Amino acid sequence: MEALQQLVEQHDGIALKLNWNTLHSRKEESAADLVEFREGKLVAFLGLYPFGNTLEVCGMVHPAYRRQGIFTSLLQRGLNSATVVSYSTILLNAPGNSDTAKPFLAAYPCRFDFSEYQMKYAEDPTSVRVESSPNGVQVTLRQAEGMDRPLLSRFDQEGFGLTAEETKQFYDPLTEEEIRQNELLVYEGEAVGKIRVSRRNQEAWIYGFVVSASRRGQGIGGTVLRQIVDRERAGGFDVWLEVALNNPNAMKLYEQAGFRVCRSQDYYAFLR
């Protein structure tokens, strides 16, 4: 799959969002990923990624095997009637600059819904170095534990508009090890937010970053971003994150912290 992704990205000049952190943590019996082999060679992949009541879909086809109906067949298998009725929202994801995905999606039963930016930290050598705790704000990070499931759920509800049932469905099945991939933001002795960093191929991706609504505007978010950037860059990682275009407050925070837009991903809502 990694070899196919590299081939497709180089051929098309794109960056696919295959959620490798999720793929590596898949349970073997989940059957959430579909593949197509030809003469013993992997030529297509389709990944289904559930997030509460939303299902995200992304995939790829070897350039030499396109226009043969392979991806359409994978979608028909992946978005079967049982799967479709299980989610309130189904989103098909494609790189914003993909010249092959756009005509395919234009002919598929879906409509453009929104885009998100993928941003990379790029320190400006001419700028003044910002300290990890600007304005004297002291925030520490601690690894989440199993007992923190209710906290993680509450922060996701506040930050991403998820329901209590959606967050329960997401966090309850996670193992202790998976829970520990999250870090809690501790300010004045209180957990005031959460963040998760996924590392792969010398890239550190920030996910699920939330500051409690009652604690926003106090410099906590900027302080945590600075700490994460310093820590990950010291480990030799480039630091990336994603932000929806309709979230200007988050965009402003990330730009002030030194992140710059490098590419975009488009999301299309599946029409039932």
Image (cartoon, grey):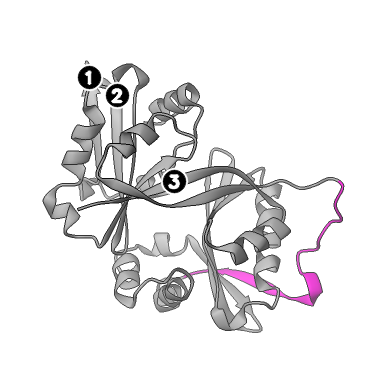
Residue pictured at 48% horizontal, 40% vertical: 96
In this view, 250 is above or below 67: below
Residue 167 position by quadrant: bottom left
Disc 3 marks a residue whose amino acid type is Asp
Q: Secondary structure at mark 1?
A: strand
Considering only vertical position in the picture, is 270 above or below 42? below
Task: Give 64 or 27, whichever is nearer the viewer.
Answer: 64
- Looking at marks 3 and 1 on the same chain, the residue that comes earlier in the sequence is marked by 1
Return the mark for residue 244: none
Q: Position of residue 25 (x, y in %)?
A: 36, 50
Helix or strand or loop: what does disc 3 sit on?
strand
Q: CA distance from mark 3 to mark 2?
A: 23 Å
Residue toward you, 85 or 4: 85
Mark 3 or 2: the one toward you: 3
Mark 3 or mark 2: which comes first in sequence?
Answer: 2
Q: Is residue 46 toward the left or the right of residue 154 in the image?
A: left
Q: Which residues are magenta?
A: 126-144
Q: Secondary structure at mark 2?
A: strand
- Residue holding disc 3: 266
Residue 143 colored magenta? yes
- Residue 235: percent from left, percent from top: 66, 47
CB under 8 Å between discs 3 and 2? no
Do residues under tags 2 and 1 come within 8 Å of each other at their CB atoms?
Answer: yes
Give the residue number, with chain letter if any, for mark 1: 38
Left/right placement of residue 39 relative to residue 149 reads left
Q: Is residue 121 magenta?
A: no
Q: Nearer the viewer, mark 3 or mark 1?
A: 3
Q: CA distance from mark 2 to mark 1?
A: 7 Å
Q: Which mark is residue 43?
A: 2
**Residue 2 position (above or below residue 64):** below
| Residue count near mark 3 (Cα–Cα under 10 Å), binned few <14, some 14–19, many ≥20 | many
Whole-percent x, y for residue 78 in the image: 20, 43
